[in-house]
Image (cartoon, rainbow, N blue to C red):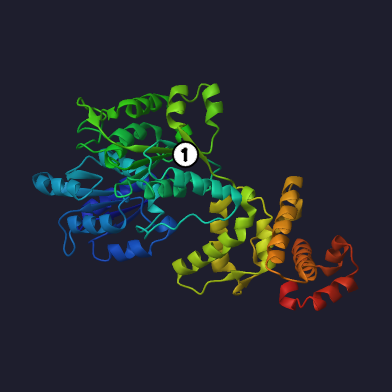
Amino acid sequence: MTDAPIWVIDDDRSIRWVLERALQGAGFRVEAFTDADGILDRLAAATGEERPAAILTDIRMPGLDGLGLLGRIGERWPNLPVIIMTAHSDLDSAVSAYEGGAFEYLPKPFDVDEAVELVQRAAAVGEESAETGEVPGPLPEIIGEAPAMQEVYRAIGRLSRSHITVLINGESGTGKELVAHALHRHSPRADHPFIALNMAAIPRDLLESELFGHERGAFTGAQSARAGRFEQADGGTLFLDEIGDMPSELQTRLLRVLADGEFYRVGGRDPRRVDVRIIAATHQNLEQLVAEGRFREDLFHRLNVIRVHLPSLRERREDIPLLVRHFLDRAAAELEVEPKRAAPETEAWLAGLPWPGNVRQLENTCRWLTVMSPGQVIQVEDLPRELRQESPAATTAEDGAEWTERLASWAAQRLSRGDEGILTEAEADLERVLIRAALAHTAGRRQEAARLLGWGRNTLTRKIRDLGMTEADTD
């Protein structure tokens, strides 16, 4: 939450000045605007760290007013928290603001410390979703043809008519939320809300309010009642990401909701009932957390009704070329540039890397390459330095076995198509890959590359010529 960007919109110079100083003192980056005109264009153009974690806006301003801005933001960025500032006599507008989806309202004159605390709560919720930008169109189906992914597809298919609780486990960056979206889209609840909450992204003292909501006056800064994620997801699906990070006291409350569908808002006296399907996800070993006393065993069994394991990218290397093409196309569309493609030897190099960050790391690499690669065809030497230095040849013996299995699969596929001369083709491709790898490893020094390959320099030069590799390929 530190250094999160906050936008303040008010035509009153003194209000802007006070909020700027107070929020900057709390560690936020603040941009102030005199009116709402142009804000939507700024939001659409903002990327990454430029996007606000929360917006504070006055209601009454020249041009587009605060409620109009709130409605437009709600259509395109529904997860972006908007705090409405209003005079004491303008409570009707505050009610309209909540109906329009405002995170909270800040009555004028306000206490500066309460204003900062309110923004901190909003930013804690909004900082993660601020990176997602506009509401996307229909979510893309999960990409992958590897046997390990077929198991995931089968699980989604078997659960398509079910309301049952699902636990997704897999390493960070494997796409657990994408699978949760797919489970929701292919369920009877598809026409109802899909609400996500990352346990690791929300400060511990705000989690209870985020999950269960709060009543007016429940704590400092709770100026009005607010529905939590359970109520927002009523009739639909609530995705609890990184469930292993849930505090023990909240585990008890979650267990009761799973048991009878009832809960109390923070500060509330009346029970509330919801009909929500729970999908939970974690990269941790929950059984181990149970054994260590850090996760309730009864809650674990409530969540672990159906478990879906999401494979790491190392377990589905054959999907990497397909994913590379997809992510390069997506990055080009986002940046409105011509899509680039990876040379076959580059795809082979990428397929041999360990990818500790999994699909997320690969996607970010493709974004980097779309911007930084000098040509339309991405060569091994165009890769980030850390990926060029991490030679696929340095992977484990198990990875080597996977490589030979992939080669066997490729050969069987080509032979089944009636292709001939596949050994010559494979030898040429293999030599190209190894030559590029050796030259990348030695920063283009041919004498050293030839020695690593077990050739003389003249042999390497001849091979480069015979294989039709250009100077640009081998620089």
Residue 216 lies left or right of residue 362; in this view the side is: left
Rendering quarter of residue 145:
bottom right
Residue 248, horizontal then vertical, whole percent = 43, 25
Determine if residue 4 is in view.
no
Give above or below for 297 relative to 73.
Answer: above
Q: Badge 1 is on which residue? A: 281
Residue 431 lies left or right of residue 335; in this view the side is: right
Residue 379 lies left or right of residue 455; in this view the side is: left
Residue 216, horizontal then vertical, whole percent = 19, 33
Give above or below for 422 relative to 237.
Answer: below
Residue 301, horizontal then vertical, whole percent = 46, 26
Q: Quadrant of the C terminus?
A: bottom right
Which residue is at 23% across, 55% downward?
Answer: 70
**For this rendering, which residue is in front, 96 or 465?**
465
**For this rendering, which residue is in front, 181 or 106?**
181
Q: Residues within 10 Å of mark 1 (few under 14, many from 20)?
A: many
- Type of amino acid under label 1: Ala
**For this rendering, which residue is in front, 39 or 184?**
184
Residue 450, horizontal then vertical, whole percent = 86, 66
